[in-house]
């Protein structure tokens, strides 16, 4: 048995009534505030590092600029040209196309603000999670009133297929877990990004963090999408309390049933990470993950069964360092939409205060509103402070769930 694996997890599907093997709570880390900030900034930096971020941020450009990019791509295809187009500004201000965070960071901030709203509220964080999703669903219902179907409604936000489908289900009168189960992208990692932030509600308590992450994930995911959210929340809860990379990976594995695709992939990826320790570290691990873990068949590279194992393995191979893990994650182009963000969140929490270089900190601390327009200008450093202080001065991230 690999030293990373620890005890075998309990088999079966984790759910609100099924517990999965997990470690007891850990003592709170004295530098929780710094780790929380590094987690959010690491997530944002990883989000920015992946090539899809430029396309997400291009949503703030006039529509014709994106149309022209598509036409240039068609020209390259039809004329066998190896000069490929990139998002362009032409005669428009180029600010939206500069390096910066995109959709993952904005949905993480959405979750962070939900945590803040739940602090001291009668229903706690779970009540705030439900209220946040139902507010968005009400907007979907309003936008879809004149649309031929919910999926074609023009929404005041940009979201993953799983999130759009979940919101459409809510708007149609369904509730979780049906909103996540009756969902074409139940398996994607949208909830895994949110789970990184939800871990701040229970630093040092992986089991409680995983349970909260599942509660949120059921609005948009099922199966591996839920398993992945539980795993990321457990790993982050450990990292926020000072656990090392291997310990955080074991906490994640405890939430991943061995008989699932995500469970098999995570164990194989961590085995590969051990092999890569003395052969290039995180960078040396990239080809192994590309050939053994990453799928090249499906249209989208957002399956939790791939991105979560990639994040765990790269964090271990890099010794918890974002400087080693995040660029390696960005090299995996198929999963570059979210694997770098998940990797950045985990390694940011693992390394703490020095995790994010100042240049990346300045480039990634402010959101542009490319996915959630009302979050434009949100400062992630300020938001991290509100989370850990309880938005009212209570230290220790004491959030009632």
Image (spheres, helix red, strand yellow):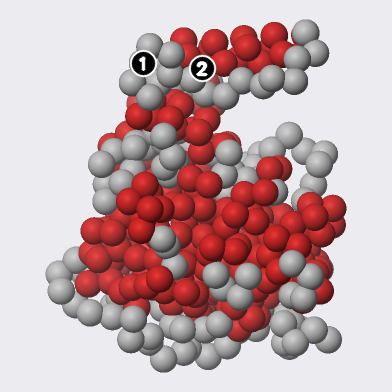
Instruction: Compare residues 79 and 238 and report the one nearer the observer.
Output: 79
The residue carrying pointer 1 sits among few (fewer than 14), some (14 to 19) or many (20 or more) residues within 10 Å by Cα, namely few
Residue 258 lies left or right of residue 122; in this view the side is right
Q: CA distance from mark 2 to mark 1?
A: 12 Å
Point 56% across, 66% down: residue: 232
Asked which quadrant contains residue 234, the reply is bottom right
Which mark is drawn over residue 80?
Answer: none
Instruction: Compare residues 368 and 194 and report the one nearer the observer.
Output: 368
x and y, in percent, of residue 330 in the image: 62, 49
Point 23% across, 64% down: residue: 386
Whether residue 11 is visible: no
Q: Secondary structure at mark 2?
A: helix
- The quadrant the N terminus occupies is bottom right
x and y, in percent, of residue 111 in the image: 38, 55
Instruction: Compare residues 122 and 302 and report the one nearer the observer.
Output: 302
Residue 330 lies left or right of residue 263; in this view the side is left
Residue 400 lies left or right of residue 290; in this view the side is left
Q: Secondary structure at mark 1?
A: loop
Asked which quadrant contains residue 78, the reply is top right
- Front position among marks 2 and 1: 1
Point 33% across, 51% down: residue: 362
The residue carrying pointer 2 sits among few (fewer than 14), some (14 to 19) or many (20 or more) residues within 10 Å by Cα, namely some
Q: Which residue is mark 2?
A: 66
Q: Which residue is mark 1?
A: 92
The answer to whether mark 2 and mark 1 are in CB contact below 8 A is: no
């Amino acid at each position: 048995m690999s030293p990373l694996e620890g005890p075998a997890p309990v088999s079966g599907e984790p759910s609100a009534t099924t517990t999965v093997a997990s470690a007891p709570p850990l003592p709170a880390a004295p530098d929780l505030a710094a780790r929380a900030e590094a987690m959010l900034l690491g997530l944002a930096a990883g989000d920015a590092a992946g090539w899809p971020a430029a396309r997400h941020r291009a949503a703030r450009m006039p529509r014709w600029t994106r149309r022209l990019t598509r036409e240039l791509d068609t020209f390259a295809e039809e004329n066998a040209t190896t000069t490929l187009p990139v998002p362009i500004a032409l005669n428009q201000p180029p600010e939206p196309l500069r390096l910066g965070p995109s959709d993952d960071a904005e949905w993480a901030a959405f979750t962070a603000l939900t945590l803040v709203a739940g602090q001291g509220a009668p229903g706690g964080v779970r009540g705030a999670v439900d209220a946040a999703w139902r507010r968005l669903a009400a907007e979907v219902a309003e936008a879809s009133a004149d649309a031929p179907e919910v999926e074609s409604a023009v929404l005041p936000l940009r979201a993953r297929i799983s999130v759009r489908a979940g919101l459409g289900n809510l708007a149609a009168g369904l509730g979780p877990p049906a909103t996540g189960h009756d969902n074409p992208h139940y398996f994607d990692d949208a909830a895994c990004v949110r789970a990184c932030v939800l871990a701040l509600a229970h630093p040092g308590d992986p089991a409680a963090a995983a349970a909260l992450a599942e509660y949120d994930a059921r609005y948009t995911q099922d199966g591996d999408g839920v398993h992945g959210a539980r795993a990321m929340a457990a790993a982050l809860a450990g990292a926020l309390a000072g656990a090392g990379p291997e310990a955080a990976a074991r906490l994640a594995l405890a939430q991943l049933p061995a008989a699932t695709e995500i469970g098999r992939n995570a164990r194989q990826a961590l085995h590969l990470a051990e092999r890569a320790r003395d052969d290039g570290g995180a960078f040396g691990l990239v080809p192994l993950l590309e050939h053994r873990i990453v799928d090249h068949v499906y249209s989208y590279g957002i399956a939790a069964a791939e991105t979560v194992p990639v994040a765990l393995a790269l964090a271990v191979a890099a010794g918890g360092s974002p400087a080693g893990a995040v660029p390696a994650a960005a090299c995996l182009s198929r999963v570059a939409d979210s694997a770098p963000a998940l990797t950045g969140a985990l390694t940011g929490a693992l390394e703490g205060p020095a995790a994010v270089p100042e240049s990346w900190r300045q480039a990634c601390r402010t959101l542009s509103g490319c996915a959630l327009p009302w979050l434009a200008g949100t400062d992630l450093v300020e938001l991290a402070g509100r989370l850990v202080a309880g938005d009212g001065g209570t230290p220790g991230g004491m959030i009632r769930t």
